[in-house]
């Protein structure tokens, strides 16, 4: 490919008429002026400009720089669909925003993290060394990217005006002036306040406006190309086949699938780890819920701005078939059609894309340089005494950093950028920031990752990046200095990848391998373990976002106050210390609070050094940190034990509640029993008393009448004593007190004895007894007297319910398995199903009884107690009015069987 | 003038026998019911001059019988005496609420019972 310089002049010939230099300068100045005013107004009244999710999503579009604006068309013309993976990666990540971004933002706000080096330092024991290394990687890595923007503005300016850069040295160079104005802008709006966590509302609004303008301008060119140049959509579709080889083939030129995959991976890292993206994603975020909107709106923006790349590239291939400089076709096309206004709009859109990126990127980088490089150095070399107006100095450092970074970028353009396309330069930066990925991502999910591993991985990866990607671009014959197996684009002699994929693969693989393997061997130091716990639990479990304080109390508040005044100024220092001023000595929580506040201003590593300078003697020793950690884990263990205990208590409470319910039920049953008992006792007493009184008050009662009444009194007295005996019996049975004999019992013999004992009653009532003892085996184990009690009870009941005449009772036995079943059946009125259900309950007499032998209502209840005690069962069968049959079963005595 | 009729309802035969004797001795005509249902039927059919109802009876207890007789309107002023072997205050209140005039706890004194009956019937 011909150098863009020559290509540009060729293109200039083709497009012909250029715009007036004064007009372009005036338009640029006006546009920049508008941005200044907007930023100034927003910063003056930030409360009136509360940003919503829309602003957040559009601010992320700072991702689309000149690279997108001009470079995509160039990339498409050069290698077809290969411009796309740069947007696929971010789209994939954006879709996942809701899953991790809110947690990441909360964690960073809680830890006062405002840059990637800060993140790394905070995660790995507040290491100043790691922060410095990461800053170095960030600054050096992103310089080509900033240079790219300067070059893009320069190129578009040259094309638009026909002005030849380089004619008048540095001061006649467009990119120099672009760099200078961008430096001014970044200084004014990026470094107004020391406290980074105080967000740059003005800057964000400027980015949003620029995002809208670049989308509008690019869309305008796209529509112009589609309808004015290509003759509408159908005409374009008809002719697209002519160019399908170059435009639609994803493998065109250097494209391989590995390259696609690598580009996707790199752009995924870039959307998170580019300093400006981290700034917008995390630091400038005002509400974590905005992440949800951004997860679809930002990808939509990417789709809209990429929609026009192919038509424009297509038109460019058509219009300028033999010239290079495809990076400027977006501008060249309207110019070649004499569309001055559109060309100017496109230029301003490109300017927006470039300035937006430069402002945010340099602001973010300057913060990193001042907090993570300059401040620790100043503190170390100037000692504790020289903290006078530290805050002011830091701001100065930041402003100088911005100037310096832009200056370096400018020289990078001058020395190397000339020969390279926009995209190639940007991709080198993508690889550089991707080196943050192992330390950041592993650090969020793996407690074991430790400082030396991350530092070594980053260092090795960075060196390989310098070797394979960066240095070859600034030093033309760099490769010739290396032996064959160390060639920058063919490490170990492997040349199977394109240069970018090659460099990215080897440097990132080295970083990852070193980080993981060094983490596997050795253990993190205690101060790291605390932070690891905080980060991993915050990201994976949504746990606490602050670790334990590693300070002991004891520093003098006065010293602390003086230090704070130096760094953040008097009012802020007062605010931080408000409520603590009364005490002369700072306690551990206060020191932690001060450290957190300082971290917001100067980064976590520097904040630790600063607090250490005041409370150095009160930092915990290694042993103390270990003890603290042990305490923390002890606290966690106790919390778990507490939870366990509380669960147990809950179970116990449930059991108690159930027991209480049961007790209430028993209490109610007891009340019922007492009430029923009272009734059952008073009823015979009533008869006895009534008849006694009648006989007392009626001396002239006939003898027959008197004898009848005496008989009633006697039988009611017997009923009373029977009742009392049975109650005693029942309570004895229920309480399990009382001797139970456990002996072999021949059941048939007991049946016979029971029948004999009631012989007089049967004869008196004229009842027929039918005996049908079919059981072959009748030996059971138990208490013979009790069994007889059951039988007598059942027989008495049967007698009670037998009709006056023709009463018949059938007693039968039968073997069923290992049981003997005995039944006593009468030919009385029977028992309804409803009554059968409760007939074995106490005091439940069948209402159908004829009332001759008055029962107590306890007999069946006692019978059931006895049978069940002997592991048998008692039940009733009856179909009124065909009598009732009571049956009980008892297990056979196996020994005698 | 014909004898005054007194309805007695109880499920205990022996108590019925004693009450029947006492009422006849005092010169009243007893009307005997063995449960609540029979008591209501007899009361509505014969319109006795006084009712003596046991509380714990099968099919329909004394309270229900008392309430039904009062609600029927057929015997608005006839005195009703409840007999109970339970004797809890709650039962007494319930009995009064159902429209009973007297509440006598078993075992009762025959003299007192008869005195109450005579008083309620205005036969002092």
Image: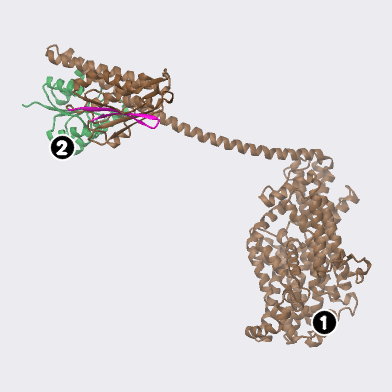
Chain colours: A brown, B green
Q: Could you tell me which residue is drawn at 61 percent across and 39 percent down? A: A643
User: Could you say whether the residue bearing mark 1 is in a helix, strand or loop?
Assistant: helix
Give the farthest residue toward the left.
B1
Residue A733 numbered mark, or none: none
Q: For residue A8, which numbered disc appears in the image?
A: 1
* Res A63 → quadrant: bottom right
Q: Which residue appears at 73% of the width and 38% of the height?
A: A631
Residue for badge 2: B74
- Residue at 77% in and 85% down: A321
Residue A691: x and y, percent? 20, 17
Position above or below: A827 against A137: above
Q: Tell me which secondary structure the magenta stretch mostly adopts.
A: strand
Quarter-wise, where is residue B98 in the image? Answer: top left
Residues marked 2 and 1, same chain: no
Can you see residue A184?
no
A851 or A827: nearer the viewer: A827
**Does dot 2 land on a helix, a strand or a loop?**
loop
Q: Position of residue A361 (x, y in %)?
A: 78, 65
Question: In this view of the protein, which residue sits in the foreground, A323 or A78?
Answer: A78
Count of numbered circles on the image: 2
In the rendered view of the protein, which quadrant contains the C terminus of chain A? top left
Asked whether residue A810 is drawn in magenta, I would say yes
Nearer the observer, disc 2 or disc 1?
A: 1
How far separated are the C-alphas under marks 2 and 1?
123 Å
- Quadrant in which the N terminus of chain A appears: bottom right
Near mark 1 (Cα within 10 A), the count class, few <14, some 14-19 or many ≥20, is many
**Chain on which label 2 sits:** B
Chain part drawn in magenta: A806-826
Does the rendering let one see residue A436? Answer: yes
Give the image quarter of residue B96.
top left
Residue A332 locus on image (x, y percent) = 76, 83
């Amino acid at each position: 490919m011909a150098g863009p310089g020559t290509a540009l002049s060729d293109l200039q010939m083709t497009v012909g008429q250029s715009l007036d230099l004064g007009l372009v300068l005036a338009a640029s100045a006006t546009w920049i002026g508008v941005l200044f005013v907007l930023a100034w107004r927003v910063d003056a009244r930030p409360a009136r400009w509360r940003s919503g999710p829309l602003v957040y999503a559009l601010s992320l579009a700072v991702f689309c720089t000149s690279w997108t604006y001009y470079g995509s068309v160039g990339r498409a013309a050069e290698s077809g669909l290969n411009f796309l993976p740069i947007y696929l990666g971010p789209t994939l990540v954006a879709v996942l925003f809701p899953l991790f971004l809110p947690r990441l933002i909360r964690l960073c706000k809680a830890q006062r993290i405002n840059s990637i080096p800060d993140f790394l330092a905070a995660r790995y024991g507040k290491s100043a060394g790691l922060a410095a290394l990461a800053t170095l990687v960030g600054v050096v890595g992103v310089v080509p990217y900033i240079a790219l923007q300067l070059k893009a503005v320069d190129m578009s300016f040259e094309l638009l005006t026909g002005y030849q850069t380089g004619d008048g040295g540095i001061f006649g160079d467009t990119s120099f002036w672009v760099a200078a104005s961008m430096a001014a802008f970044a200084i004014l709006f990026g470094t107004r306040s020391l406290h980074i966590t105080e967000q740059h509302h003005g800057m964000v609004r400027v980015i949003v406006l620029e995002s809208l303008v670049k989308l509008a301008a690019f869309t305008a060119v796209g529509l112009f190309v589609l309808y004015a140049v290509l003759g509408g959509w159908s005409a374009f579709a008809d002719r697209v086949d002519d160019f399908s080889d170059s435009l639609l083939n994803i493998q065109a030129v250097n494209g391989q699938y590995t390259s696609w995959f690598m580009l996707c991976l790199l752009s995924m890292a870039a959307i998170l780890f580019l300093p400006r993206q981290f700034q917008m994603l995390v630091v400038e975020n005002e509400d974590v819920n905005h992440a949800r909107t951004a997860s679809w709106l930002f990808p939509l923006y990417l789709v809209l701005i990429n929609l026009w790349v192919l038509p424009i590239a297509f038109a460019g291939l058509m219009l300028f078939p033999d010239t290079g400089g495809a990076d400027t076709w977006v501008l060249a096309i309207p110019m070649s059609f004499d569309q001055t206004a559109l060309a100017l709009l496109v230029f301003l859109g490109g300017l927006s894309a470039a300035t937006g990126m430069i402002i945010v990127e340099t602001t973010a980088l300057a913060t990193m340089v001042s907090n993570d490089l300059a401040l620790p150095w100043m503190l170390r070399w100037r000692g504790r005494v020289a903290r006078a107006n530290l805050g002011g100095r830091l701001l100065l450092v930041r402003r100088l950093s911005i100037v310096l970074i832009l200056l370096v970028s400018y020289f990078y353009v001058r020395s190397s950028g000339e020969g390279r396309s926009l995209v190639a330069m940007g991709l080198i930066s993508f690889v550089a920031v991707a080196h943050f990925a192992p330390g950041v991502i592993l650090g969020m999910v793996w407690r074991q990752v430790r400082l030396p591993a991350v530092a070594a991985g980053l260092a090795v990866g960075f060196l390989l990046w310098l070797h394979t990607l960066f240095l070859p671009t600034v030093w033309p014959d760099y490769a010739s200095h290396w032996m064959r197996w160390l060639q920058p684009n063919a490490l170990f002699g492997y040349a199977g990848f394109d240069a970018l994929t090659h460099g990215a693969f080897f440097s990132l693989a080295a970083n990852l391998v070193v980080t993981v393997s060094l983490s596997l061997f050795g253990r993190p130091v205690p101060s790291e373990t605390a932070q690891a716990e905080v980060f991993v639990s915050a990201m994976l479990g949504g746990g606490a976002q602050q670790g334990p304080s590693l300070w002991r109390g004891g520093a003098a508040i006065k010293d602390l106050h003086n230090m704070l005044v130096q760094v953040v100024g008097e009012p802020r220092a007062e605010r931080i210390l408000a409520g603590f001023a009364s005490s002369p000595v700072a306690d551990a929580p206060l020191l932690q609070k001060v450290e957190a506040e300082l971290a917001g201003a100067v980064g976590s590593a520097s904040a630790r050094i600063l607090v250490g300078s005041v409370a150095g003697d009160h930092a915990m020793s290694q042993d103390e940190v270990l003890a603290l950690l042990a305490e923390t884990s002890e606290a966690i263990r106790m919390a778990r034990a507490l939870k366990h205990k509380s669960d147990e208590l809950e179970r116990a409470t449930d059991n108690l509640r159930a027991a209480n319910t049961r007790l209430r039920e028993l209490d109610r049953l007891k009340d019922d029993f007492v009430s029923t008992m009272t009734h059952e006792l008073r009823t015979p007493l009533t008869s006895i008393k009534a008849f006694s009184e009648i006989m007392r008050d009626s001396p002239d009662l006939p003898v027959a009448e008197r004898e009848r009444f005496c008989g009633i009194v006697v039988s009611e007295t017997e009923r009373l004593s029977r009742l009392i005996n049975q109650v005693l019996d029942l309570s004895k049975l229920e309480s399990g007190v009382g001797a139970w004999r456990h002996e072999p019992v021949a059941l048939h013999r007991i049946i016979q004895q029971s029948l004999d004992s009631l012989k007089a009653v049967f004869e008196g009532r004229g009842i027929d007894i039918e005996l049908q003892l079919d059981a072959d085996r009748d030996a059971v184990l138990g208490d013979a007297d009790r069994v007889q009690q059951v039988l007598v009870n059942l027989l008495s009941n049967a007698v009670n319910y037998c009709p006056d005449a023709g009463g018949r009772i059938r007693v039968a036995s039968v073997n069923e398995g290992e049981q003997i079943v005995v039944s006593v059946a009468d030919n009385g009125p029977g028992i309804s199903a409803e009554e059968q259900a409760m007939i074995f309950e106490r005091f439940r007499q069948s209402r159908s009884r004829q009332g001759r032998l008055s029962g107590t209502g306890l007999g069946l209840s006692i019978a059931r107690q006895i049978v069940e005690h002997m592991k048998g069962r008692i039940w009733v069968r009856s179909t009124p009015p065909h009598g009732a049959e009571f049956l009980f079963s008892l297990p056979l005595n196996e020994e005698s069987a | 003038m014909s004898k005054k009729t007194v309805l007695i309802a109880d499920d205990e035969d022996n108590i019925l026998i004693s009450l029947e004797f006492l009422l006849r001795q005092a010169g009243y005509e007893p009307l005997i019911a063995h449960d609540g249902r029979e008591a209501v039927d007899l009361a509505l059919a014969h319109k006795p001059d006084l009712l003596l109802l046991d509380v714990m009876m099968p099919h329909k207890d004394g309270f229900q019988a008392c309430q039904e007789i009062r609600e029927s309107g057929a015997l608005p002023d006839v005195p009703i005496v409840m007999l109970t072997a339970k004797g809890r205050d709650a039962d007494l209140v319930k009995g009064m609420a159902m429209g009973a005039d007297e509440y006598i706890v078993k075992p009762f004194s025959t003299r007192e019972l008869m005195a109450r009956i005579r008083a309620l019937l205005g036969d002092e």
